[in-house]
C-alpha cells in the first residue's frame, strides 16, 4: 500500500504524479491477472521491458527480436495485450489531468498572496501597473470578445461511456491526496478504483455504429451540463473580484465577452445527415438543456431563500411581481408554496412554472411563460434588489448574481449555433432557381464580374426570387429550407441562437453574395425605404487554401465596396466575421507556409476592413492536432497580431480537445482563466505596442523567404511526386481510420480519391497513427535552411527571433513538439506496407532526410542538447509514453499487413479489423492526438 502514502518533501508534486501512475498501473496489473491470468501480465511486462530497452539503446538485433515477439503473439493474447496498453494510456492521461489541477492548487497554497503567472489577477494587475484608468479598462473589457465553438469533427476516438468511467476514476484518484482518510477509507477507495478499472476493461472501447448528428449534439451538450454552466460564471466572478481589488472605486459588471458556440447540428459541409430538421431539433435540445438547468438552479435556491416577512421587510416591487404572477400563471407543474410568510419561495414557484411553460408549445405567446431570457433576468433582479433591501447582500452576491450571469451567458439557447455549407452547394441552388425564373440559363458558367453584378441587383430588388408553386430538386429545396429554419428559429429562440452562416471554400465575392441573396429571400436581410438595412444573419467567408488566403483581401475589398453588402455589415454593428482555416491551409502548403500566410492574411484583411470603417471578428478554425493548428488555448490567442483582435476572436474546439479541456471543472476553469488573461494582455499590447516593430518587419521578411522555399519543398512531395498518394495510402492506416465509428461525417467531401477532396482530419490522423506526424513538420527544415546557409551570423539572427519574435517562437515550439513526438524508426516499419519497394525507398528517404534537417536546425535555434530541454515536464511525459506506445505501433503494422492480405483476396476478418481499430484508439490515447 505504499502507493497510497502521501509523499512529503520539496518534490512533492511530481512525486504525487508518479504515485498516481504507479498506483493505477498496479491496479491495472491486478485486473490483467484477474481477467487473463498471470500469463497475460507476464507477456505485457515482457513487451514493456523490451520496448523500454529498445528506446534506451536501438540495436538492430534487439529490434528484430522485439518484432518477432510482437508478431508471434497468438490472436487471443494479442487482443488482450492491445487493450492492456491502450487502457494503461487512458489511466496515465487521467493521472496527468488530475495533476494539472493539483499543481494549480499547490501553487496557490505555496505562494499565498503571490500572483500566479497567466492568471486573471496577473493580467488585471498589469492593467493597473501600466496606468490604465477605470474608463480605459471598461473600454477594453467592452471591446473584448472570445467565442469558443464546439465542433463535431471526428477526432474524439473515445466513447461517451468510456469518458464517463474516466470521470469517475479521476474523481476517486483526487481523493488520494486527502490526508484525513483513514486506513480503512483508503482501502475502500482502492477497492472502488479496482472495480472502476475492471468496468473499464469490460466496456467496449469501440462504437458499434457511427454516431448520428443528434448523438453528437448530446455529446456536446454533456460539457455544458457537467462543466460549463458552472465554470464559465466563475471566470466572470473572478474577473470582477480582481477588478474590485485593483479598481475599488468602480462598480463592475462585465459585458458577456466570453461565450461558447457550436457547429454541432449546423455544420452541413460534406455531411448530408445535417438537414434543416436536424438543425431545428438541435436548437430545441439546446433550449431544453438551458431551461432544465435554470429549473434545477431555482430548485436549489429554495433552501437559501427562506426569509420570512415576520422578520424582514421585502420590497414592494417583489410583492407586486408575485401579485402579477398569481393573476397570469396557473401552477400546474410546480407545487404551490403554502407559507405566505415566505414570499421568495412563492416567487420561485411561479418562476419555475413559467420555465416549464417555455418548453410547452401550448403556452406559446401566452403571458404565463418567459418569452425571452431577459424576462427571467428581470425576475431575478427583482429578487436581488429585494434581498439587498433587507441587507441579505451575501445571499444575493453568492446565488442570485451567479444565476443572472448564467442566463446572460446561455439564454434559452445554451450556445449560438453556426450554420456551415460548401460554396458549391449555394452556386448549384442559385443556378437552378435563376434558370427556373428565366433570369439566366447558366448562372454557374457566368464570368465572376457578371455573377457579382447580377447578385447585387437581386439584393437590391425587393421582389421574391422563388415561388411556392415552383418545384426544385431535393438539394435546392434543402438549401432554401435551411434559411427558412434560421428565420423561424430567430423568432422562436431569439436572434442570438443563429447569426453566422459560414461558407466553406469561399473563393470569390459571388460565394458570399449568394448567401445574402438567400437570406433576403426569407426575410433575414431586408432593405428599408430610407436605404438602411435590417440583417440578422451574416455571411461568413471561410478562406482555407493558400490561394484563398492570398485572394482574401481583394475579395473583402470588393465586397465592402458594394453598397448593399456594406449596408448589411452596418446592420451588424459594422462588424464582419471572417473565418480562416488552419487545417486545409496546412494540408495545402505545409506548416511554415500555412502559419506565415495566415499571419499575412490577418494583417492585410484587417487593413482592408479599416479602409471601410469595419471591425473584424476573426474565426480561427484550429484543429486539435499539431498539423491542424493545434496549441494551448491561451497561446492561440497570444500569437495573433495584436491589431487583429479588436473585433473579437472565435476559435474552434474540436474532438479530443473538448474532453481534455472541459471534462473536469478544475481544468476547464484553468483553461478559460488563461484564455481570459491572454485576451486582456493582447488588448494591452494592441493599445501599447512593444518597441520592437522595426525588428519584426525585418524578421517578417526572413520568414517570408523561408515560407516560399518551404512551400516549394512541401508541394514537390505532396502534389508533384506522382507516387506520393499511393505511398501515403499504403504506409498509413488511412483506410482503416475511416472504419472507426467516431463521427457522422464522411472522411471525404465527395466520393473521390483525389487528394484535394480528402479532409484534413483523416490526413493528419493517419500520419499521427503511423508516427510520421508529417503534416506538422515536413519542409520546415528546408525553409529554415534557406536562411541559415550554415552561417553562424544567420543562426544568431534566428536565435534572436526565437527569443523576441512571438510568432517565430510559437512556430519553432510547435515544430519542436511535433519532431519529438514523431518516430522515424517506427515510421519506417509502416513504410514497408508500401508494396512498391522503389517508391517506398525513394519517398521515405526524402521524408527521413527532411526530418533530420528539421530536428538539427531546431536544436541549434533553441540552443538545446535534446528537444524540450526547456520544457522538462513535457519532455518527461513524452519519454515516459513512448515505450508504451511503441508496442501498439508494431502491433498495428502487423495487423494492417494481415488484414490487407485478406482483403486482397476479396475476403474480410471482423476480429482482425477490430484489433486494428483498438490499436488506433490506443495510439490516439498514447499520443494524446488523433486528427
Image (cartoon, rainbow, N blue to C red):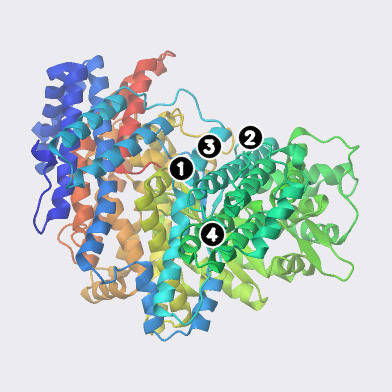
Foreground of the two, 388 or 758: 388
**Of callouts 4 and 3, which one flags the residue occurring earlier in the amino acid sequence?**
3
Classed neighbour count for the residue bearing mark 4: other residues with Cα under 10 Å, few (<14), some (14–19), many (≥20): many
**Of callouts 1 and 2, which one flags the residue occurring earlier in the amino acid sequence?**
2
**Residue 35 in picture, x, y percent from top left:** 22, 18
Q: Which residue is mark 1?
A: 761
Q: Which residue is mark 4?
A: 405
How far apart in space, not on screen, are marks 1 and 2 (Cα)? 18 Å
**Residue 82 in picture, x, y percent from top left:** 26, 26
Classed neighbour count for the residue bearing mark 1: other residues with Cα under 10 Å, few (<14), some (14–19), many (≥20): many
Q: Dot 2 lies on which element?
A: loop
Q: Dot 1 lies on which element?
A: helix
User: Answer yes or no: do the residues labelled 1 and 2 have beta carbons within 8 Å?
Assistant: no
How far apart in space, not on screen, are marks 2 and 3 (Cα)? 19 Å
* Visible residue check, residue 888: no
Q: Is residue 233 left or right of residue 670?
A: right
User: Answer yes or no: do the residues labelled 1 and 4 have beta carbons within 8 Å?
Assistant: no
Q: Is residue 509 left or right of residue 238?
A: right
* Visible residue check, residue 293: yes
Classed neighbour count for the residue bearing mark 3: other residues with Cα under 10 Å, few (<14), some (14–19), many (≥20): some
**Of callouts 1 and 4, which one flags the residue occurring earlier in the amino acid sequence?**
4
**Of callouts 2 and 3, which one flags the residue occurring earlier in the amino acid sequence?**
3
Foreground of the two, 37 or 141: 141
Which of label 1 and label 2 is nearer to you?
2
Which of label 4 and label 3 is nearer to you?
4
Q: Which residue is mark 2?
A: 272
Amino acid at each position: 500500500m505504499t502507493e497510497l502514502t502521501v509523499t512529503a518533501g520539496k518534490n512533492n508534486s511530481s512525486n504525487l504524479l508518479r504515485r498516481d501512475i504507479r498506483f493505477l498501473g498496479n491496479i491495472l496489473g491486478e485486473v490483467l491477472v484477474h481477467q487473463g491470468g498471470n500469463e497475460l501480465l507476464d507477456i505485457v511486462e515482457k513487451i514493456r521491458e523490451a520496448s523500454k530497452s529498445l528506446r534506451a539503446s536501438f540495436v538492430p538485433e534487439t529490434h528484430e527480436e522485439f518484432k518477432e515477439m510482437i508478431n508471434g503473439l497468438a490472436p487471443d493474447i494479442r487482443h488482450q495485450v492491445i487493450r492492456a496498453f491502450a487502457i494503461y494510456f487512458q489511466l496515465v492521461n487521467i493521472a496527468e489531468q488530475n495533476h494539472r489541477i493539483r499543481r494549480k492548487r499547490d501553487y496557490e497554497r505555496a505562494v499565498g498572496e503571490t500572483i500566479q503567472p497567466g492568471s486573471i489577477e496577473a493580467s488585471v494587475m498589469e492593467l493597473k501597473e501600466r496606468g490604465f484608468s477605470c474608463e480605459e479598462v471598461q473600454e477594453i473589457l467592452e471591446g473584448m470578445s472570445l467565442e469558443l465553438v464546439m465542433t463535431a469533427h471526428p477526432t474524439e476516438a473515445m466513447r461517451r461511456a468510456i469518458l464517463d468511467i474516466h470521470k469517475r476514476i479521476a474523481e476517486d484518484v483526487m481523493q488520494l491526496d486527502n490526508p484525513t482518510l483513514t486506513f480503512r477509507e483508503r482501502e475502500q477507495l482502492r477497492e472502488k478504483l479496482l472495480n472502476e478499472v475492471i468496468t473499464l476493461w469490460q466496456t467496449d472501447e469501440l462504437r458499434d455504429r457511427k454516431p448520428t448528428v443528434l448523438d453528437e449534439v448530446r455529446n456536446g451538450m454533456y460539457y455544458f451540463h457537467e462543466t460549463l454552466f458552472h465554470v464559465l460564471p466563475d471566470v466572470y466572478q473572478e474577473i470582477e473580484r480582481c477588478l474590485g481589488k485593483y479598481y475599488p472605486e468602480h462598480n463592475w459588471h462585465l459585458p458577456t465577452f466570453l461565450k461558447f458556440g457550436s457547429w454541432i447540428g449546423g455544420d452541413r459541409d460534406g455531411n448530408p445527415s445535417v438537414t434543416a430538421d436536424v438543425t431545428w431539433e438541435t436548437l430545441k435540445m439546446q433550449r431544453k438543456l438551458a431551461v432544465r438547468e435554470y429549473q434545477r438552479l431555482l430548485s436549489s435556491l429554495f433552501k437559501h431563500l427562506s426569509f420570512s416577512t415576520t422578520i424582514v421587510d421585502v420590497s414592494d416591487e417583489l410583492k407586486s411581481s408575485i401579485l402579477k404572477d398569481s393573476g397570469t400563471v396557473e401552477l400546474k407543474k410546480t407545487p404551490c408554496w403554502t407559507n405566505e410568510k415566505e414570499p421568495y419561495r412563492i416567487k420561485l414557484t411561479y418562476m419555475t412554472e413559467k420555465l416549464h411553460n417555455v418548453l410547452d408549445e401550448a403556452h406559446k405567446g401566452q403571458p404565463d411563460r418567459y418569452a425571452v431570457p431577459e424576462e427571467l433576468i428581470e425576475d431575478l433582479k427583482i429578487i436581488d434588489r429585494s434581498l439587498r433591501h433587507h441587507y441579505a447582500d451575501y445571499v444575493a452576491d453568492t446565488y442570485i448574481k451567479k444565476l443572472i450571469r448564467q442566463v446572460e451567458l446561455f439564454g434559452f439557447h445554451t450556445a449560438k449555433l453556426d450554420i456551415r455549407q460548401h460554396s458549391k452547394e449555394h452556386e448549384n441552388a442559385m443556378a437552378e432557381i435563376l434558370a427556373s425564373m428565366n433570369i439566366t440559363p447558366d448562372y454557374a458558367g457566368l464570368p465572376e464580374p457578371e455573377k457579382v453584378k447580377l447578385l447585387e441587383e437581386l439584393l437590391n430588388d425587393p421582389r421574391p426570387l422563388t415561388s411556392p408553386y415552383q418545384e426544385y430538386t431535393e438539394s435546392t429545396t434543402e438549401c432554401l429550407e435551411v434559411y427558412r429554419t434560421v428565420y423561424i428559429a430567430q423568432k422562436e429562440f431569439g436572434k442570438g441562437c443563429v447569426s453566422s452562416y459560414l461558407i466553406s471554400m469561399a473563393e470569390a465575392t459571388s460565394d458570399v453574395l449568394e448567401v445574402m441573396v438567400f437570406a433576403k429571400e426569407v426575410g433575414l436581410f431586408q432593405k428599408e425605404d430610407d436605404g438602411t438595412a435590417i440583417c440578422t444573419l451574416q455571411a461568413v467567408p471561410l478562406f482555407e487554401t493558400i490561394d484563398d488566403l492570398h485572394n482574401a483581401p481583394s475579395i473583402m475589398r470588393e465586397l465592402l465596396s458594394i453598397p448593399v453588402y456594406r449596408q448589411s455589415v452596418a446592420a451588424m454593428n459594422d462588424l464582419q466575421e471572417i473565418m480562416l482555416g488552419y487545417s486545409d491551409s496546412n494540408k495545402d502548403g505545409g506548416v511554415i507556409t500555412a502559419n506565415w500566410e495566415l499571419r499575412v492574411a490577418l494583417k492585410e484583411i484587417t487593413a482592408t476592413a479599416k479602409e471601410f470603417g469595419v471591425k473584424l471578428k476573426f474565426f480561427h478554425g484550429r484543429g486539435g492536432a499539431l498539423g491542424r493548428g493545434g496549441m494551448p488555448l491561451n497561446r492561440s490567442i497570444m500569437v495573433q497580431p495584436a491589431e487583429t483582435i479588436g473585433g473579437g476572436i472565435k476559435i474552434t474546439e474540436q474532438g479530443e480537445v473538448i474532453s481534455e479541456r472541459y471534462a473536469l471543472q478544475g481544468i476547464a476553469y484553468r483553461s478559460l482563466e488563461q484564455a481570459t488573461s491572454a485576451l486582456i494582455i493582447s488588448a494591452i499590447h494592441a493599445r501599447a505596442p512593444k518597441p520592437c516593430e522595426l525588428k519584426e518587419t525585418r524578421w517578417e521578411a526572413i520568414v517570408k523567404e523561408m515560407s516560399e522555399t518551404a512551400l516549394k519543398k512541401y508541394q514537390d512531395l505532396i502534389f508533384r511526386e506522382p507516387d506520393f498518394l499511393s505511398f501515403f495510402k499504403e504506409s498509413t492506416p488511412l483506410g482503416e481510420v475511416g472504419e472507426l465509428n467516431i463521427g457522422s461525417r464522411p472522411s471525404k467531401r465527395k466520393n473521390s480519391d483525389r487528394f484535394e477532396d480528402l479532409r484534413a482530419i483523416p490526413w493528419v490522423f493517419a500520419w499521427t497513427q503511423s508516427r510520421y506526424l508529417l503534416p506538422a513538420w515536413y519542409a520546415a527544415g528546408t525553409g529554415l535552411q534557406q536562411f541559415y546557409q550554415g552561417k553562424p551570423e544567420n543562426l544568431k539572427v534566428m536565435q534572436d527571433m526565437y527569443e523576441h519574435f512571438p510568432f517565430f517562437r510559437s512556430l519553432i515550439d510547435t515544430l519542436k513538439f511535433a519532431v519529438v513526438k514523431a518516430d522515424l524508426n517506427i515510421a519506417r516499419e509502416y513504410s514497408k506496407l508500401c508494396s512498391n519497394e522503389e517508391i517506398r525507398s525513394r519517398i521515405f528517404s526524402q521524408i527521413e532526410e527532411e526530418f533530420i534537417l528539421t530536428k538539427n536546425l531546431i536544436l541549434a535555434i533553441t540552443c538545446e542538447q535534446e528537444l524540450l530541454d526547456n520544457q522538462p515536464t513535457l519532455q518527461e511525459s513524452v519519454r515516459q509514453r513512448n515505450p508504451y506506445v511503441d508496442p501498439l505501433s508494431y502491433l498495428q503494422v502487423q495487423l494492417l499487413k494481415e488484414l490487407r492480405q485478406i482483403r486482397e483476396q476479396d475476403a474480410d476478418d471482423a476480429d482482425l479489423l477490430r484489433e486494428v481499430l483498438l490499436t488506433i484508439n490506443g495510439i490516439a490515447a498514447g499520443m494524446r492526438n488523433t486528427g
